[in-house]
Image: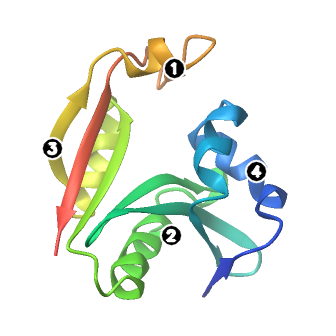
Amino acid sequence: MNIIKVSNDKKAYINLLLLADEQENMIDKYLENGEMFVLYENGVKAECVVTKEGNGIYELKNIAVMPDCQRKGYGKRLIDFLFSHYTDCNEMLVGTGDVPSTLGFYKKCGFVESHRIQNFFTDNYDHPIFEDGKQLIDMVYLKRER
């Protein structure tokens, strides 16, 4: 397994990012300002984009795992890598939809619910967003502290 930082041509990895955030102009808002990491193991297995939000605070803006590689530990390995990479990280935030499978993944990775942004998905996306058959309305923010 190898995790690399991607500094150039981040859009080359857009297809996988679109699994986690299906509207490209929303990804564009954080892609260039964020740091991208790609996990390889006989090809791309997972990738993420992280932004620095403040002193010791980072936000995981997007994390996506290839569909045939999900539930095999790649997402958790990428999150664990981020905590070792960002040695000054005291708090990692992540915003996601209110879906039990996704919230369960983050909780297994050590995140706890922090707060919610009401109507985030209905106010910021040009079409209804569904995950696991449920329409996403509010964004749930979770945090993991060191």
Tell me, yes or no, whether the two marked residues, 2 and 3, touch with CB atoms within 8 Å: no
Residue identified by numbered label 1: 124
Taking the image as shown, residue 75 lies to the left or right of residue 47, namely left
Q: CA distance from mark 4 to mark 1?
A: 19 Å
SS for callout 3: strand
Residue identified by numbered label 2: 74
Q: Quadrant of the C terminus?
A: bottom left
Residue identified by numbered label 4: 14
User: Which one is closest to the eye, mark 2 or mark 1?
Assistant: 1
Type of amino acid under label 3 = Ser
Q: Which mark is residue 33?
A: none
User: Which one is closest to the eye, mark 2 or mark 3?
Assistant: 3
Residue located 42% across and 86% down the image: 85
User: Which one is closest to the eye, mark 4 or mark 1?
Assistant: 1
SS for callout 2: helix
Of callouts 2 and 4, which one flags the residue occurring earlier in the amino acid sequence? Answer: 4
Residue furthest front in the image: 55
Tell me, yes or no, whether the two marked residues, 2 and 1, touch with CB atoms within 8 Å: no
Decide: few, some or many residues near mark 1? Use Cα within 10 Å; few <14, some 14-19, many ≥20: few
Q: Is residue 107 above or below residue 76?
A: above
Q: CA distance from mark 1 to mark 3?
A: 20 Å
Type of amino acid under label 2 = Tyr
Tell me, yes or no, whether the two marked residues, 1 and 3, touch with CB atoms within 8 Å: no
Taking the image as shown, residue 33 lies to the left or right of residue 90, namely right
Tell me, yes or no, whether the two marked residues, 4 and 1, touch with CB atoms within 8 Å: no
Decide: few, some or many residues near mark 3? Use Cα within 10 Å; few <14, some 14-19, many ≥20: few
Where is residue 45 drawn, in percent x and y? 65, 68
SS for callout 1: helix
User: Which one is closest to the eye, mark 1 or mark 3?
Assistant: 1
SS for callout 4: helix
Where is residue 136 drawn, in percent x and y? 42, 19
Type of amino acid under label 1 = Asn
